[in-house]
Each structure stands twice: as structure tokens, then as C-alpha cells.
Amino acid sequence: MRLLIRHETRYRYDSPVTRTLQTLRLTPRSHDGQEVLRWRVVPPAGASLAAGEDGYGNIVDMLSLERPHDALTLLVEGEIETRDTDGVVTGAEERFPPAFYLRPSPLAGADAALIALAEQAAAAAGGEPLALAHALMRAVQDRIAFRPGLTHAATTAAEALAAGVGVCQDHTHVFLACARHLGLPARYVSGYLRMADGSVEQAAGHAWAEAFIDGLGWVGFDTANGLCPTGHYVRVAIGLDYRDTAPVRGLRQGGGDEALEVVVRVGQSQFQAQA
């Protein structure tokens, strides 16, 4: 499947900003399940970009804008060819052994309630890791209703489970906390999703988890939707939790209050590859 992606981030400020520095994790890599056909990051006028990588192997662009501005628009767009691998990830950049992803992280630490949820899923699944991951995905989805606007970027797994509501980021953090408690290496994935109902415009990107399964390797689990990623998914960045994969993080001098608008469009190209 060929997917066309356009992701626009717009900031407006109450008063002029004199300097903006941002770290961007917005560029996907090719692997066995996806091929990047074309991709570009378009910074605001006058800004500079410096490309690099982080410790996980994610592509990182450092944006610097050092002139007064009261608005900033950042655009990324491209075309990706994907194929359905039943959620199994192969051929991707791997900088750490699976055991690295057993460590807790600030947004995905396990409290007593998360441990109880993990143990309940483990009891239902038995000892087979793949069955455990699927049982955990179902258990988290049952406990957290998808409801935008009630959590935020710094909401922890414990807070999301206690609230019983959240978005894909919260489902993923709860899955990670539970999986790691059970000895199953798990990591956070940011990316894009072509919606099943065919709608193109979205208010944000997507997030899901990957768990390391002996004999298979890394396998994706989209707890928010209750399935393993298909050819509708584009994988961009990985990390221990959202903080390692945030599409845009940064700081600025001046500006007062800001208004943020994000528009993501994920559609299918009319030009599809033929076998």
C-alpha cells in the first residue's frame, strides 16, 4: 500500500519570540515493512535544520530559528510504501538488545494497580509470550476507554489507568508498564495510521507498542485499536516512552502564551504498486 502523509504543526504566540530551538523526530526509516519513497521536512522561513540520529537510531532534525517571529509553521510530507507483516518488525535499526527495554521509564512505571492488571492478563494467557502480549493488549483496551482531551503528553501509565480514559499514548504506556513488569521487553513507537473508515484528516499522529517475542523478534501491538499493525501503519520513532519519540520538542525565548494547531493527513496514493 502506498500512503501519502502530510503533517503540519502551527504555533501562534501572544508576543514575538526571539529564538526557537526544536528537536524533530518526524522522519521515518525504511525497513522490511515499509519503504520511504520520498520525504521532506519543510522548516519555517529563515530557520536552519541540522540532521542527525539519536541513541535509538531515530532520525532527528535540529531546528533553529533566530529571528523575531510571532508564528511558526512546520511541515513534513512524503510517500511511503508499506506491506502487511502481521506486526512483525524486521530489518529495522536496532541499537540496543531487547533487555534494554525492560527498564522502567518516567511515563511507564508500574504501580500496584498496573501490576495487578499485568498479573491478571498473565494468568489468563499462560506462559507463552505471544499469547501473553495479546492478552495484555485486550486487558488494557478493556480498562481504558478511548476519549481524547482528558489526558496530556505528561500523563503517566498509572494516572491513565486510574482515570480509565485516554488516547493511544496512554494505552501504549499502560501496555509498556505491564509488559515490563512481566519480563517482556516492550517499547514505545510513534508514527502514522491510515484510518480504517477511510477518513484522511486527523488531529495527531499515532502511537503503539512493540514487544520482543522469542522466535519472532519485535512485534507491534496497537492497544488503542486492539490489533497488530498492518500495512496501514507507518513507523517513525522508537523509545522507552513518549518522551523519547515526541515528534516536536523544544524551547523558545519570549512569546508569552502560545496556541498550537496540528493537522495530520494520511491517505492512500492513487498510484499503487503492482505485483
Image: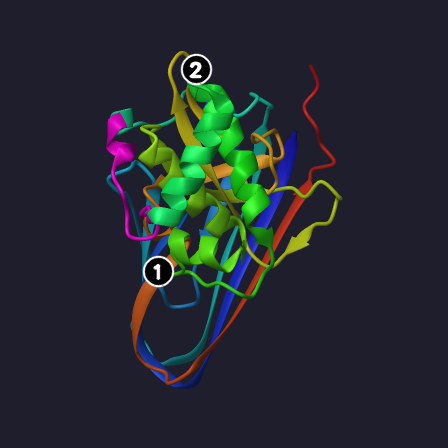
Regarding residue 209, the answer to whether it shows in the image is yes
* The N terminus sits in image quarter: top right
From the viewer's side, name the closer residue of 199 and 49: 199
Given residues 113 and 19, the one toward you in this image is 113
Residue 144 position, x and y percent, is: 55, 50
Kindly identify the residue that appears in the image at 37 percent across and 15 percent down: 214
In terms of secondary structure, where does tag 1 sit?
strand
Residue lying at 31% horizontally and 48% vertically, measured from the top left: 109
Dot 2 amino acid type: Leu
> In the image shown, does 50 or 258 lie closer to the viewer?
258
- Residue visible at 43% across and 45% down in the picture: 174
Say which quarter of the image contains residue 258: bottom left
What span is colored magenta in the figure? Answer: 99-111
The residues bearing labels 2 and 1 have C-alpha atoms spaced at a distance of 33 Å
Amino acid on which disc 1 is placed: Arg
Kindly identify which numbered label has been placed on residue 249. 1
Q: Secondary structure at mark 2?
A: loop
Q: Residue at x 75, y 44 (%)?
A: 198
Residue 105 percent across, percent down from the top left: 28, 47
Q: Position of residue 73 (x, y in %)?
A: 49, 67
In the image, residue 179 above or below residue 17: above
Rendered location of residue 86, percent (x, y): 57, 22
- Can you tell which quarter of the image residue 2 is in? top right
Mark 2 — residue? 216
